[in-house]
Amino acid sequence: MNDVFISYAHIDNETLEENQKGWITQLHRILQVRLAQLMGAEPQIWRDLKLTGSDLFDQTIVEQFLDSKILVSVLSPRYVNSDWCTKELEEFCLNAEKEDELKIHDKSRVFKVVKTPVEAEGMPPRIRELYEKLLGFEFYEMEPQSGRVVEYNEVFGEEAKQRYYEKVYDLAHSIYDVLKTAKVEPESQAVPTAVSESKTIFLAEVSSDLYSERDQLRRDLIDRGHKVLPAFNMPPIGPQVEEMMLATLPNCDLSIHLVGQRYGMVPEESDCSMGELQNRIAAGFDKEHFNRLIWLPKGGKPQDEKQKIFVGLLVESQDAHRGAEVIVDTLENFKEFVVEKLAPKPKPLKVKSSEPVQVSGVASAEEDANRVYLICDQGDEESIEPLEDYLYDQGFEVSLPEFEGNEAEVIEIHRQNLVDCDSVIVFYGSARNSWVDIKLRELLKASGYGRTTPIQHAAVYIAPPSNRRKDRYRSQTATVIQQDEIFAPSTELEAFIKQIKPSL
């Protein structure tokens, strides 16, 4: 039995240059390699290598795609105009529907790869009906100024090649999920497994300027073991969008809404864009322990008046951001925030006795120590050493972040340091300004990690290399300490030390 059958129009595998591999050939090869890496075994992927438009739809080919677990349909203008290609897709779906096996759990066995976009009106009705239900993998983007379609192909440069590989990897991961699910035994025979720490996330559709960013975030979430919904494209009709979301959101722990500079598509029978409509529905959804995150790009400027109004509502209107956290930052910092949000909550510490441990009649050094948590980016591990030594010489116990081990361990140690410390210094060296802001915001969450009192004293220690942004850095929540090119205890640092240890 084949794992995957690739259905395509042969003209889409024609090359622009001699001695170049065809687009479909490349797709097949990379998919073969990536699936083998994920499965730990060689996948069976089949496509017809010799079919021409005059060949008959013979039983041998029919048996190949009917005997496949998954069908990858490569959409293009030629594909929808080919009786052969559309019949492959239709026959596969009809056969699967007869057996009630078009989906495995909630995952479709048909994957839509969009090589070249085709207007829905140009598709046969049955094919259009099938495609509207499928989550597509779009291997192209639109140029903002000209509206021209640019396909992901290595002949168009390194960036297009990189986007091509990213999309094939996304496709491979999704196919692997279905193949893996297909191997699971029926529920009555399944062996109980440990409760997973993974979350189910509703990742809202976005306007065209954020397709790449949404794909990147979706990829990262799946790689971390989370389930990302919806599994299918949103319908193009407003009431159906609401129906689909209200059926999906009860299964989710979190919804994420990325808001860019364009207003985006307005579904039929709707008075607002897809992005605004999804946010409106999620804002009205009432479920205990359901969270909503809204991301706006730092420095982004809406390109039209409707988007400007929508962004204004998200920031200022309580109805628009009800129950949500609105994050204005870079995507990388937002992803870091999401990871923190989804990380498992630390278990409460078990206290055996309320009395301090005594050693020869004296409280232990650990109990008596004044602990400073010195937070730094991994790139500053060496740069913090003079400050770390100075704090230790002043009688402090110094805690540092952990950079080795798996992600859950690193986050757990960070949280435990926030719980245990008496004061915090955020080292602003090679990291970005936004990274410092995130670390300061995390201090406010320490009570949620098990801390019983607020962190009273916090400082941002500004170290080389200097720049205009660092020179102008200000904070209402932390003391700002500037360091010269070479470390020496400054007046600001000494004053902060007296604050956190008045006995000095």
Image: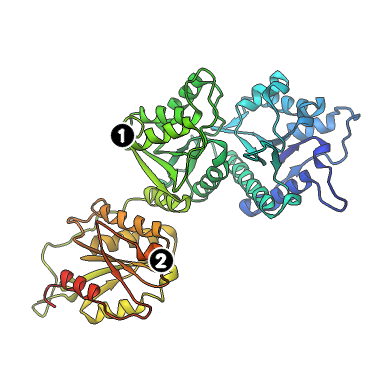
490 shown above or below 132 = below
Amino acid identity at mark 2:
Asp
Which color mode does the image show? rainbow
Residue at 65%, 25% in the rendered image = 130
Q: How far is disc 1 from disc 2 in space, using C-alphas?
A: 35 Å
Which residue bears the numbered disc 2? 377
393 shown above or below 13 = below
Q: Of all residues shown, which one is farthest toward the left?
A: 361
- Where, quadrant-wise, is the C terminus in this rendering? bottom left
Tell me if residue 475 can be seen. Answer: yes
Q: Position of 420 compared to 219: left or right?
A: left
The x, y position of residue 59, in whole percent, is: 84, 29
Residue at 83%, 37% in the rendered image = 10
Tell me if residue 123 can be seen. Answer: no
**Mark 2 burial class by Cα count in 10 Å: few <14, some 14-19, many 20+:** some
Amino acid identity at mark 1:
Glu
* Residue situated in front as seen by the camera: 141 or 255: 141
Q: Dot 1 lies on which element?
A: loop
Quarter of the view holding residue 424: bottom left
Task: First in sequence, mark 1 or 2: give its number.
Answer: 1
Quarter of the view holding residue 105: top right
* Closer to the eye: label 1 or 2: 2
